[in-house]
């Protein structure tokens, strides 16, 4: 399952060079993950109330082409399961030319009442489950 979210760079997200500051790409990726989960009926707030916290364990970002103020872009993601981890493979493409701006691999884990575990509602979102 591939999820896509269209967004636009805001002026304040850029640094002195006039390009998006590298830290903001993590915000874009995180926002896309949250939107994906909400569209699938998975609520972070509800999970937290139940003692379940999905957290980032590791993130790797490869930067390719910088985004600039006003650029529109498409953030795409797929999620796979790797043992106890839910691995999000994400890409940001500048619009309209679809140039790859950056890509990330985001390893997430679930803490259930403070202990590592898995959740059926997250398992159902993985590519392996939807084949």
Image (cartoon, rainbow, N blue to C red):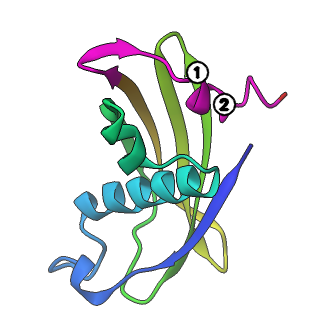
For disc 1, the marked residue is 81
Q: Which residue is rendered at x = 60% and y = 35% of the image?
A: 79
- Write the start and end of the magenta stretch as one range: 111-130
Query: From the viewer's perspective, is residue 116 above or below residue 12?
Result: above
Confirm whether the magenta stretch covers residue 37.
Answer: no
Q: Which residue is rendered at x = 85% and y = 27% of the image?
A: 131
Q: Tell me if residue 102 can be seen.
A: no
Residue 39's image quarter?
bottom right
Query: From the viewer's perspective, is residue 50 above or below residue 17?
Result: above
For disc 2, the marked residue is 126
Q: Position of residue 105 (x, y in %)?
A: 46, 36
In the rendered image, the residue lying farthest to the front is 50
| Mark 2 or 1, nearer chain start | 1
Q: Position of residue 97 (x, y in %)?
A: 67, 75
Left or right: 30 with respect to 131?
Answer: left
- Image quarter where the N terminus lies is top right
């Amino acid at each position: 399952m591939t999820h896509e979210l269209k967004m636009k760079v805001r002026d304040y997200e850029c640094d002195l060079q006039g390009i998006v500051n590298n830290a903001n790409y993590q915000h874009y990726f995180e926002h896309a993950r949250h939107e994906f989960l909400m569209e699938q009926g998975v609520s972070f707030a509800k999970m937290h109330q139940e003692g379940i916290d999905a957290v980032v364990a590791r993130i790797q970002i490869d930067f390719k082409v910088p985004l600039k103020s006003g650029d529109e872009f498409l953030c795409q993601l797929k999620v796979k399961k790797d043992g106890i981890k839910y691995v999000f493979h994400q890409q940001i493409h500048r619009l309209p030319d679809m140039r790859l701006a950056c890509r990330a691999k985001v390893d997430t884990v679930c803490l259930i009442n403070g202990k590592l575990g898995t959740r059926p509602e997250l398992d159902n979102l993985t590519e392996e489950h939807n084949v």
